[in-house]
Image: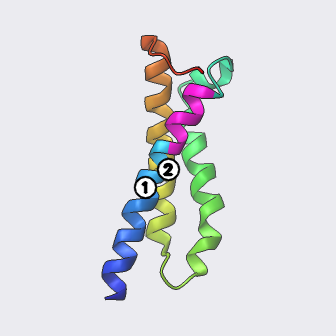
């Protein structure tokens, strides 16, 4: 039971990282030149994963969840940058 719950938490963390990063890039960072650099998604993903790592001390959250959160954040950042380059509306 606990194993299935931790898998669900890991998948949810990855999806949440993706959605939050994509929206943040599209809404808040659209005028920041540094987000367009090729290494920005890698840096964002690593930073998010490291920041989520202390949550792995909780019983349900594992290091896999923290890693998936970092991967989701990196992919969401890359997706947000692509959306900005395509000219998709993201601003309010």
**Residue that extends furthest to the front in the rendered view of this protein:** 92
Say if 23 sits above or below 46 in the image: above
Labels 2 & 1 near each other (Cβ < 8 A): yes
Q: Residues within 10 Å of mark 2 (few under 14, many from 20)?
A: many
Tag count in the figure? 2
Q: Position of residue 39 (x, y in %)?
A: 56, 32
Side of 91 where 78 appears, left or right: left
The front one of 13 and 35 is 13
Quadrant of the snapshot with the N terminus: bottom left
Quadrant of the snapshot with the C terminus: top right
Q: Residue at x 49, y 56 (%)?
A: 69
Say which mark, if any, is on residue 14: 1
Mark 2, secondary structure of its residue: helix
Q: Which residues are magenta?
A: 20-27
Q: Residue at x 65, y 59 (%)?
A: 51
Q: Position of residue 10 (x, y in %)?
A: 41, 66
The colour scheme of the drawn protein is rainbow
**Disc 2 versus disc 1: distance between alpha carbons?**
5 Å
Magenta: predominant secondary structure element? helix
Say if 69 sits above or below 40 in the image: below
Say which mark, if any, is on residue 17: 2
Mark 1, secondary structure of its residue: helix
Side of 25 where 83 appears, left or right: left
Q: Residues within 10 Å of mark 1 (few under 14, many from 20)?
A: many
Per the image, is 9 magenta?
no
Q: Position of residue 9 (x, y in %)?
A: 42, 69
Q: Residue at x 58, y 50 (%)?
A: 46
């Amino acid at each position: 039971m606990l194993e299935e719950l931790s898998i669900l938490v890991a998948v949810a963390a990855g999806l949440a990282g993706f959605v939050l990063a994509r929206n943040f890039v599209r809404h808040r960072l659209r005028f920041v030149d540094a987000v367009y650099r090729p290494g920005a998604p890698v840096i964002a993903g690593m930073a998010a994963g490291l920041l989520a790592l202390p949550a792995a001390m909780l019983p349900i959250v594992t290091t896999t969840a923290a890693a998936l959160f970092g991967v989701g954040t990196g992919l969401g950042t890359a997706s947000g940058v692509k959306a900005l380059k395509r000219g998709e509306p993201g601003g309010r």
